[in-house]
Image: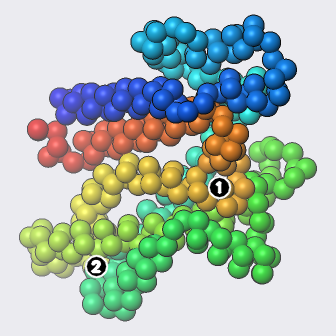
C-alpha cells in the first residue's frame, strides 16, 4: 500500500506540472486567441466584444496567479474552455467526440503488438538459434526504425491506392449511419486495418526483443530445470512456468508503451485523415486554436499517467515481491 500511495503522489505531482505548463506556455507565446479572432473578423469586433472574449479565454488584466487558480479550478471541473476553430463549442465536447476513435486505434494496435510480440519472443527464445530467432528480430527492429508516418504513407499507397484492398481515409464510409450493427462494425474494422497495421509494425519488434531476452534469462532458472527433470511437457514448461514469469517486465512496459502508442496514433491519424484527436490537433494548430491545443495536450498527459498508474497497480498485484517494499 505504501508503494501505491508513493507512486500516486508522483503521478499527481506530474499531473500538476503538466497543468501548470499547459497554463503558462500559451501565455508566453506571441499572440493570443482573441487577436486571432479579431484578425479573422477583419476589425469588425467592438471593444466590448473583445473584452468579453478576453475574459472568456482567461486573458484579461487579472493577475497571473488569479488566472492560474481559476484555470486550475476549471480543469478539475471539466471546463477546458471554448474552441476557437469550432466556436462556440466547448473544448471538452470537441475532444469527447474524437477521443473514442483515438482510443480504438491506439488500444487495438497496442494489444495486437503486445500479444504478437510477446508470443514471438517466447517462441524465439525457446528455440534459441533457430530460424525464427535468427531472422525475425533483426527484420522487425529494422522495420521499427522507420517513422510512423513513413510506413503509414507506404501502406496507404500500396494497399489503398495501388491494390485498393482497404479504404484511404476516415473511420467509416461517408453517408453510413453509425450504430452497433454488423455493417457499421465491419466498415469501421476495414478502415482500422491500415492505421493499426503501421503502428503494429513499428512497435512489435521491441515487444519481441524484450520478451526474448527475458525468456532467455528465465529459462536458465532452477525451477525450469526441475520442471524439465520431472518430465513435464515442453509446451507446459514454456507457457505455464517460463513465459508466465517472464511476462512481468512486459506488464510494466505496457504503460510506457501506451504513451508512445498514443504519439504514433496522432501521426498516423493525420496521414489517414482518421477522425481522432491527432487529426483534430493538426486542425487546431493550423487554426491557432490555443484552448483546443491545451485541452488535447492535457488529455493525452492525463491518459498516459492514468495508464501507468493502472500498470503499477497490476504489477503490485502480479508480483508478490513488490508488496513487501
**Residue 186 makes an appearance in the image:** no
| Position above or below: 268 against 66 | below
Quarter of the view holding residue 164:
bottom right
Q: Disc 2 marks which residue? A: 125
| Position above or below: 287 against 164 | above
Percent coordinates x, y for residue 197 in the rendering? 59, 68
Q: Disc 1 marks which residue? A: 269
**Residue 311 makes an appearance in the image:** yes
Q: Residue at x 60, y 30 (%)?
A: 31
Q: Residue at x 70, y 60 (%)?
A: 272
Q: Is residue 168 left or right of residue 279?
A: right
Q: Residue furthest left?
A: 222
Quarter of the view holding residue 308:
top left
In the picture, the quarter occupied by the C terminus is top left
| Position above or below: 322 against 202 | above
Quarter of the view holding residue 30:
top right
Percent coordinates x, y for residue 184 in the rendering? 80, 52
Which residue is at the front of the view, 7 or 268?
268
Answer yes or no: do the residues labelled 2 and 1 have beta carbons within 8 Å?
A: no
Q: Residue furthest front?
A: 43
Mark 2, other Cα within 10 Å: few <14 / some 14–19 / many ≥20: many
Residue 9: image tag: none
Which residue is at the front of the view, 102 or 228?
102
Q: Residue at x 43, y 42 (%)?
A: 304
Q: CA distance from mark 2 to mark 1?
A: 35 Å
Which residue is at the front of the view, 235 or 174?
174
Mark 1, other Cα within 10 Å: few <14 / some 14–19 / many ≥20: many
Percent coordinates x, y for residue 309 in the rendering? 35, 38
Say how the picture is coloured: rainbow
Could you tell which of marks 2 and 1 lies nearer the N-terminus?
2
Amino acid at each position: 500500500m505504501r508503494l501505491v500511495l508513493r507512486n500516486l503522489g508522483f503521478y499527481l505531482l506530474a499531473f500538476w506540472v503538466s497543468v501548470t505548463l499547459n497554463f503558462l506556455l500559451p501565455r508566453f507565446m506571441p499572440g493570443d486567441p482573441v487577436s486571432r479572432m479579431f484578425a479573422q473578423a477583419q476589425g469588425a469586433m467592438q471593444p466590448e466584444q473583445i473584452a468579453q472574449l478576453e475574459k472568456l479565454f482567461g486573458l484579461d488584466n487579472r493577475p497571473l496567479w488569479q488566472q492560474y487558480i481559476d484555470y486550475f479550478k476549471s480543469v478539475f471541473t471539466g471546463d477546458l474552455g471554448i474552441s476557437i476553430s469550432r466556436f462556440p463549442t466547448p473544448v471538452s465536447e470537441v475532444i469527447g467526440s474524437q477521443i473514442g476513435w483515438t482510443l480504438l486505434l491506439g488500444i487495438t494496435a497496442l494489444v495486437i503488438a503486445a500479444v504478437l510480440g510477446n508470443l514471438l519472443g517466447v517462441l524465439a527464445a525457446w528455440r534459441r538459434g533457430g530460424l525464427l530467432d535468427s531472422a525475425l528480430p533483426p527484420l522487425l527492429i529494422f522495420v521499427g526504425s522507420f517513422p510512423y508516418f513513413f510506413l503509414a504513407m507506404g501502406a496507404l499507397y500500396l494497399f489503398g491506392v495501388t491494390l485498393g484492398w482497404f479504404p484511404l481515409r476516415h473511420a467509416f464510409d461517408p453517408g453510413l449511419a453509425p450504430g452497433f450493427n454488423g455493417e457499421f462494425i465491419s466498415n469501421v474494422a476495414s478502415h482500422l486495418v491500415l492505421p493499426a497495421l503501421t503502428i503494429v509494425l513499428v512497435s512489435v519488434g521491441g515487444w519481441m526483443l524484450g520478451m526474448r531476452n527475458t525468456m532467455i534469462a528465465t529459462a536458465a532458472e532452477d525451477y525450469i530445470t526441475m520442471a524439465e527433470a520431472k518430465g513435464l511437457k515442453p509446451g507446459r514448461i514454456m507457457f505455464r512456468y517460463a513465459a508466465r514469469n517472464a511476462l512481468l517486465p512486459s506488464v510494466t512496459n505496457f504503460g510506457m508503451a501506451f504513451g508512445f502508442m498514443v504519439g504514433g496514433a496522432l501521426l498516423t491519424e493525420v496521414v489517414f485523415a482518421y477522425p481522432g484527436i491527432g487529426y483534430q490537433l493538426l486542425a487546431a494548430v493550423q487554426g491557432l486554436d490555443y484552448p483546443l491545443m491545451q485541452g488535447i495536450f492535457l488529455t493525452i498527459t492525463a491518459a498516459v499517467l492514468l495508464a501507468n498508474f493502472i500498470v503499477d497497480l497490476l504489477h503490485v498485484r502480479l508480483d508478490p515481491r513488490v508488496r513487501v517494499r
